[in-house]
């Protein structure tokens, strides 16, 4: 229950960003990666997984109060989301070998323009916006790949592989510190805060409380 769909999505994103690119490029290593929405359920687990896979992870969050927590689960550096809310250039300085984006909108636009040659950006969310205003430049000049992640239609074979890897890549003790247990009635209080971006981590609904 702690991992749920968010955990499965984080596993898919992380393996796509790192392992898929390394296979496509015949072993060229993915080192520097960025994870947006890192305070959320998918983002925080992606930070942890990519760190375990040997990447230098830059976590992006709008909550400066979560900086120490993100570093404790594997982030090497932490950026505030505001730094990626500017209008994106067609191509910016290449900073990332790959990325996991849970936010969309301007954040994804900037990540695409900052991704290095042949990098894979795994996109799974639209917390900021469903629209993407970008150019073809990252794709035809640098060969960047925007890889959509859909947890619903993943094959049984892929599910089995990813869930088998979870035990090696997730620190469940550390993850447990970001999980809050609530009852069904408390959802009415928590959900509006989620929509405003005022929450972090994961919430589990205990129907017996």
Image: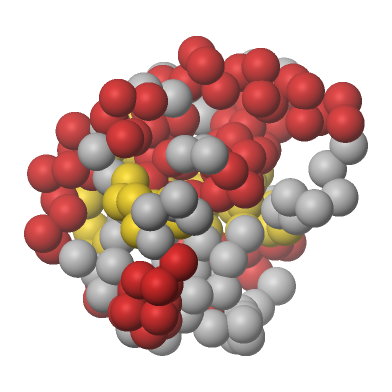
Residue at horizontal 23 percent and vertical 43 percent from the top? 70
Picture quadrant where residue 197 is located: bottom left
* Nearer to me, 77 or 10: 10
Up-down: is 56 above or below 144? above
Q: Quadrant of the C terminus?
A: bottom left
Residue at horizontal 70 percent and vertical 73 percent from the top? 136
Q: How many marks?
A: 0
Left or right: residue 89 versus residue 163 is left
Picture quadrant where residue 14 is located: top right
Up-down: is 105 above or below 164? below
Q: Is residue 133 visible from the viewing direction of this image?
A: yes
Q: Is residue 194 visible from the viewing direction of this image?
A: no
Residue 189 x, y percent position in the rendering: 33, 79
Residue 133 x, y percent position in the rendering: 60, 85
* Nearer to me, 169 or 80: 169
Residue at horizontal 66 percent and vertical 17 percent from the top? 164
Residue 3 x, y percent position in the rendering: 52, 39
Residue at horizontal 52 percent and vertical 16 percent from the top? 167
């Amino acid at each position: 229950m702690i991992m749920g769909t968010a955990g499965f999505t984080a596993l898919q994103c992380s393996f796509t960003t790192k392992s898929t690119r390394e296979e496509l490029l015949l072993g060229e290593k993915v080192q520097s990666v960025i994870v947006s929405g890192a305070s959320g359920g998918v983002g925080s687990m992606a930070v942890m997984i990519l760190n375990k896979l040997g990447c230098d992870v830059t976590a992006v969050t709008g909550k400066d109060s979560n900086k120490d927590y993100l570093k404790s689960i594997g982030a090497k550096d932490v950026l505030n989301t505001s730094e990626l809310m500017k209008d994106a250039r067609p191509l910016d300085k290449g900073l990332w070998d790959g990325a996991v984006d849970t936010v969309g909108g301007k954040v994804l636009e900037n990540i695409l323009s900052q991704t290095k040659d042949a990098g894979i950006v795994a996109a799974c969310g639209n917390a900021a916006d469903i629209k993407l205003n970008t150019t073809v430049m990252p794709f035809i000049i640098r060969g960047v790949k925007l890889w959509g992640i859909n947890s619903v239609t993943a094959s049984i074979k892929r599910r089995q592989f990813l869930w088998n890897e979870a035990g090696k890549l997730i620190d469940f003790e550390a993850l447990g510190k970001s999980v809050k247990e609530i009852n069904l009635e408390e959802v009415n209080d928590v959900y509006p805060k989620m929509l405003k971006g005022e929450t972090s981590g994961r919430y589990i609904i205990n129907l017996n409380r």
